[in-house]
Image (spheres, rainbow, N blue to C red):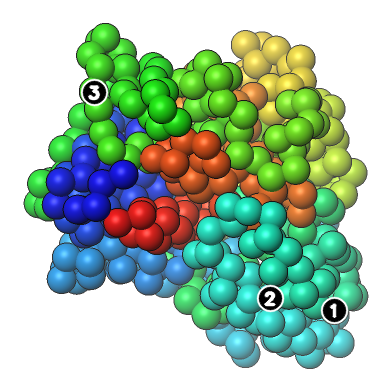
Amino acid sequence: MLNSAQNAKVLVIGGGFGGMAAALRCRSLGFDVTIIDRLPKLGGRAQVFTIDGFKHDAGPTVITAPFLFEELFSLFNENIHDHVSFVPLTPWYRYVFHNGQTFDYGADEKLLAKEIGKFSPQDINNYHNLVEASKKIFDIGFTKLAHKPFLSVNSMIEQLPHLINLRADKTVSEFVKKYIKNPFLQRAFSIHPLLVGGNPYSTTSIYSLIHYLEKKWGIHFCMGGTGRLVEALTELMVKQEINIKTNTEATQLNIKNGMVDGVILNDGEKIKFDYVICNADPPIVYKKLLRNSVTPSLGINKWLPERYTKYSMGLYVLFFGTKKQYPNVAHHTIWLTHRFKELLNDIFEGRATDDFSLYIHRPTATDSSFAPDGCDSFYVLCPVPNLKTSINWETEGKKLRNKIVNALSKTILPNLEKYITGEKWMTPIDFQETYLCEHGAGFSIAPTLTQSAWFRYHNQDKKLKNLFFVGAGTHPGAGLPGVISSAKVVESLIKNQN
């Protein structure tokens, strides 16, 4: 292995947020860095497209822990605020329940107490207790463990006392119900695992730290959209002389003497690097790029057949514009059907359903550049089963579109059927084919206890010491804070080899 960062060459495969963060961190160490992506632009799932004058972010829409992005710019003595503008949102989310009741969840303590009081006055104090309990989880789960590599079983055993004290064996739903008594508020405060691909009824309570993470840093929107943040990071990489190659796909990793010896590209070119960092779905890397020649570093699950691996849900995303504005619709809305636990169990167990719950993103509530004057732009995300089921999305895509538009027309977007325009939708098939997600799962493997930390795909392969992983499928997990943090983990691992 190289001893001099000045001579080391790093290849980052995949230009999502994890890959971009890894490229910048390696460049700050003095490495010669190249980043490749099979799509025309960097950003991974954070692509941007325009239909009939309506702009859409295709991927992440929620910015939490903005300091993680600030760090990337500060590595090069740059101030992120000279390049992008993060705007705090109020409320963070508006929940709309099946009976028409709404709950605005945000940073303002007085307004929040009033909102909680509409449902259950006793839960005002209960909520503060929940946040305090979340802080205890955050202080361990995020502050101490999120940036720590878990490469050996001993590294996991060392953390067992913390995990036991935090009751990591409990689920997020169980954690919330310990404090919140009203069933509607229980649903609202249990929703966070879905943001990282997990079922609240099976996701480890470690992910309850998101409550405190939101309280600590708030929820923001990047003016111009997440795509503008991708542009700013790309501009920073260009300025720092990182070699960027788009429309370029790695098709195979060659192995020699226990190392990745070379990478074959889609045009047949073979290139050599000292370190290879994959911001691609780990199961795809092991199956396709390594041709199953290496057993994945996946904790206890590496000894089990693949069918025992639990994957996150699939995503159906409907994009559209409206020829009028809906000013009463919040920037982020979570629209919940009458079923909650039953619906989630159906989705994660692969059963098709007639009902659904939705996350609705209306960026024009904050940034008018997303739509023509007097119009709105919408992104509607519907959790669905992944492709381990037999759902025919060629026919079901249109049917689900009609159900969603009909439901919204009767509730928070009156007469949507009359004003909708410029439509496009994505199904799990698109996630599989465009983003190479195993089984079309929107967030890689699910964040269960037995698929977290050491049990998740490792940030460094056990046998191929110059192969590293960042992104949703590796530690610490999905969501922007997770994938950006995975780059910090890899940075520490590489630094320890030099």
Question: Marks 1 and 2: in contact by CB < 8 Å?
Answer: no
Task: Give the x, y percent position of residue 457.
Answer: 60, 43
Q: Residue at x 26, y 46 (%)?
A: 2
Q: Amino acid at mark 1?
A: Tyr
User: Contact, CB < 8 Å: mark 1 with mark 3?
Assistant: no
Mark 2 or 3, nearer chain start: 2
Q: Is residue 338 above or below residue 34?
A: below
Asked if residue 177 lies left or right of residue 27, the reply is right
Res. 462 image quadrant: top right
172 is higher (above) or lower (below) than 398:
below
The picture places residue 80, in percent across and down from the top left corner, at 23, 67
Q: Amino acid at mark 3?
A: Ile
The residue carrying mark 1 is: 179
Reading the image, the residue beneath label 3 is 271
Along the viewing direction, whichever of 45 and 124 lies nearer the viewer? 45
Image coordinates of residue 146 in percent, x first then y, are: 55, 64
Which class describes the residues within 10 Å of circle 2: few (<14), some (14-19), or many (20+)? many
Q: Looking at the figure, which quarter contains the N terminus?
A: top left
Q: CA distance from mark 2 to mark 3?
A: 44 Å
Along the viewing direction, whichever of 184 and 28 lies nearer the viewer: 28
Q: Which residue is mark 2?
A: 137
Any mark on residue 27, and which? Answer: none
